[in-house]
Amino acid sequence: MSKLVAKLPGLINAAKPKLREFNRFAKTELYPPSPADIPAIFSGFGSLVRGATTGAWRNATVKEAWLNTLITVEVICWFYVGEVIGKRHVRGYDV
């Protein structure tokens, strides 16, 4: 146990730069949108719908299509994880 306590200051100092970088990304990426950001969000959704209806997705490269597929699967998985946490069961609701 004393060896672990002796290593603790070095481990803390090694983790500080990574913690600073995490805080920097967390402040920018996890910050909720401001009212000034809402028009850009709506235009982004509009261009997404317009691209889906006009068939612009057919012009995507294989790399872009694969990336879009992975992002979609990630969103679906996080939705499922949230549902499991909310239900407190893996399947079905406790009725």
Image: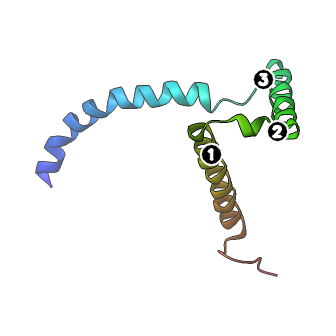
Q: Quadrant of residue 54?
A: top right
In three-dimensional space, the C-alpha distance between marks 3 and 2, rounded to whole angstroms, equals 32 Å
Q: Earlier in the sequence, mark 2 or mark 1?
A: 2
Along the line of sight, the residue nearer the viewer: 12 or 2: 12
* Whole-percent x, y for residue 89 in the image: 67, 75
Counting residues from the start of the chain, the first of labels 3 and 1 encountered is: 3
Q: Is residue 7 left or right of residue 62?
A: left
Could you say whether the residue bearing mark 2 is in a helix, strand or loop?
A: loop
Q: Identify the image quadrant of residue 31.
A: top right
SS of the residue at dot 3? Answer: loop
The alpha-carbon separation of the residues under discs 2 and 1 comes to: 19 Å
Using the image, determine if residue 91 lies above or below residue 6: below
* Quadrant containing the N terminus in the rendered view: bottom left
For residue 34, the mark is 3
* Residue that appears at 12% across and 51% down: 2
Q: Nearer the viewer, mark 3 or mark 1?
A: 1
Indicate left or right for 79 with 38 as reference.
Answer: left
Q: Residues within 10 Å of mark 1 (few under 14, many from 20)?
A: few
| First-in-chain label (3 vs 2) | 3
Q: Residue at x 50, y 24 (%)?
A: 24
- The amino acid type found where label 3 is placed reads Ser
Which label was assigned to residue 7? Answer: none
**Labels in figure, total:** 3
Q: Amino acid at mark 2?
A: Gly
Three-letter code for the amino acid on which mark 1 is drawn: Ile
| Residue at (74, 40) in percent of width and height | 58
- Quadrant containing the C terminus is bottom right
Q: Position of residue 26 (x, y in %)?
A: 55, 31
Q: Which residue is mark 2?
A: 55
* The residue positioned farthest toward the left in the image shown: 3
Q: Mark number for residue 71?
A: 1
